[in-house]
Image (cartoon, rainbow, N blue to C red):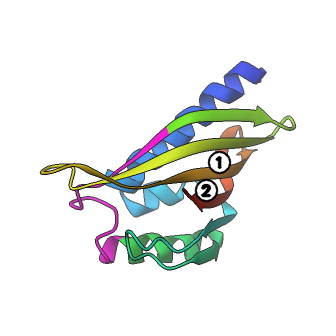
């Protein structure tokens, strides 16, 4: 796989994850993470989300379901995750790092407003020929 092919596949994966967080099925979302993935997020007072560190797909799934139950994200919440300024750096044949700025919009069907912004610092691994998210560290601001 060339460097350019890896960059395109990883950027597509990051976009797909944002789409699935807003509108997709939980299992489809989780299928894009490695089985040992880690997801770290600080508290977000704008959404009411508490600081979290989750490891493994089962714990990630618990986090996704909790955010959906709280109306923070997912189908019917009128929210959108928007990624921009994505930088991808393959660090090995099957490992890469990516950094992206994110914006989180709420009330998208009525009076759309920007709720919060931040940065994703990601580590990705290629597993069985497919790029997957292995570690996401979320920063606010």
Q: Earlier in the sequence, mark 2 or mark 1?
A: 2
Q: Position of residue 115 (x, y in %)?
A: 35, 57
Relative placement, left or right, of 91 versus 123 is right
Mark linked to residue 132: 1
Q: Nearer the viewer, residue 133 or 139?
A: 139
Q: Which residue is mark 2?
A: 33
Q: Based on the picture, tell me whether residue 39 belongs to the magenta stretch.
A: no
Label 2 crowd bin: few (<14), some (14–19), many (20+), radius 10 Å? many
Quarter of the picture holding the N terminus: top right
**Which of the 4 image quadrants contains residue 48?**
bottom left
Count up the numbered dots. Answer: 2
- Residue 25 visible to the viewer: yes
Label 2 with label 1: CB-CB less than 8 Å: yes
Q: Nearer the viewer, residue 120 or 21?
A: 120
Q: What residue is at 68 percent from the left and 22 percent from the top?
A: 5
Q: Main secondary structure of the magenta part?
A: loop
Relative to residue 62, is residue 102 depicted above or below? above
SS class, disc 1: strand
Q: Residue furthest left?
A: 110
């Amino acid at each position: 796989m060339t460097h350019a092919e890896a960059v395109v596949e990883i950027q597509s994966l990051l976009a797909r994850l944002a789409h699935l967080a807003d509108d997709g099925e939980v299992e489809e979302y989780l299928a894009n993470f490695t089985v040992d993935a880690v997801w770290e997020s600080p508290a977000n007072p704008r959404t009411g989300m508490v600081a979290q560190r989750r490891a493994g797909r089962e714990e990630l799934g618990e986090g996704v379901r909790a955010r959906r139950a709280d109306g923070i994200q997912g189908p019917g919440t009128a929210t959108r995750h928007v990624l921009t300024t994505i930088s991808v750096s393959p660090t090995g044949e099957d490992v890469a790092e990516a950094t992206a700025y994110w914006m989180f919009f709420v009330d998208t069907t009525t009076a759309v407003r920007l709720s919060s912004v931040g940065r994703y610092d990601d580590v990705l691994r290629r597993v069985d020929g497919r790029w997957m998210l292995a570690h996401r560290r979320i920063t606010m601001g």
